[in-house]
Amino acid sequence: MNFRDKVVLITGAGSGIGRKAALMFAERGAKVAVNDIDEARGKETVEKIKENGGEAVFVHGDVSKTEVAKKIVSETVEIYGKLDILVNNAGIVPYGTIEDTDDEEFERTIAINLKGPFMLSKFAVMEMKKRGGGVIVNVASEAGLVGIPKRCIYSVSKAALIGLTRSLAVDYVEYGIRVNAVCPGTTQSQGLMARVNASPDPEALLRKMKSRIPMGRLGKEEEIAFAILFAACDEAAFMTGSIINIDGGSTAV
């Protein structure tokens, strides 16, 4: 998985899986455009990449806004001259059933988890077509494939993202653009652990999470990041429209 001379744009790369993927792409030679709504975290990812000898730039912006999504892509191309790989990783994880979800949360979740990838992909394929190809990797979720308790609108947004992945793969295969999705299970990320530690009994909550996974443990950020890199690498050139489950066996039972 050599990404030398490749330009990669990763949304939500200020922490968690996005940051780990950014670091790993850079380690393998890619020039990385780091996007995040949190400027401090995004710039921290850039600094970590540079400390390791890699090349990166921060591109600030809220992916849920159409003009901002357009700017994120255009700035990346302006800085590096092209865009080879887009990783739509930014997202939020609201909790609750359909009864718990009000209009505001519905619209916010769809805007970030679905509209953002939709618009970024739209502007990305316009650039990729000019150069004869590229790759889009959408970070979906096991929740887009199976029912997860109290994740109603999150599941809806991720199931739609999987549908978008397959649609784009079919529409743009003739232009040399591949589109795949990675569906992580419960992953021991910074955000997840913050929620766990804020609970009344963190150890009990962790045991409950692990008990739902056939492997008996949570995923690691680098394991999910490796799947993202694989979906984007030249060695996987025959793969498009694929949905990669990386969930410790959760969707297999």
Image (spheres, rainbow, N blue to C red):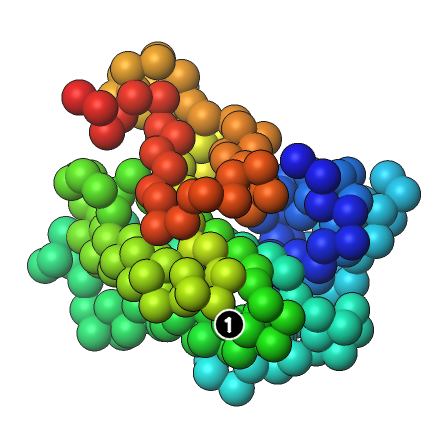
Left or right, residue 46 beside residue 180: right
Q: Which residue is drawn at 44% across and 32% down?
A: 187
- Secondary structure found at label 1: helix
Q: Which residue is drawn at 78% across and 69% down?
A: 80
Please identify the quarter of the rendering in which residue 100 is found. bottom left
Q: Is residue 3 above or below residue 221?
A: below
Horizontal side, residue 250 vs residue 7: left or right: left
Q: Mark 1 points at which residue?
A: 125
All told, the count of numbered labels is 1
Residue 160's x, y, as percent?
25, 60
Q: Quadrant of residue 103?
A: bottom left
Residue 173 or residue 161, whichever sits in front: 173
Comparing 13 with 120, the one in front is 120
Q: Quadrant of the N terminus?
A: top right
Q: Specify whether 172 is left or right of 177.
A: left
Looking at this view, name the residue that lies furthest to the front.
Answer: 174
Left or right of 243: which side holds 29?
A: right
Residue 164 seen by the camera: no
Q: Where is residue 27 in the image (x, y as percent from the top left)?
A: 77, 39
Q: Quadrant of the rendered structure where residue 99 is? A: bottom left
Image height of 161 relative to 123, above or below:
above
Residue 249 position, x and y percent, is 30, 21
Residue type at numbered disc 1: Val
Residue at 84% x, 47% y: name it. Answer: 54
Confirm whether residue 124 shows in the render. Answer: yes
Near-viewer residue (203 or 155) = 155
- Quadrant location of the C terminus in the rendered image: top left
Image spot of residue 67 (x, y percent): 52, 86
User: What residue is at 60 percent from the left and 57 percent from the top?
Assistant: 85
Specify few, some or many for label 1: CA neighbours under 10 Å numbering under 14, 14-19, or 20 or more. Answer: many
Q: In this view, does 207 lie above or below 15?
A: above
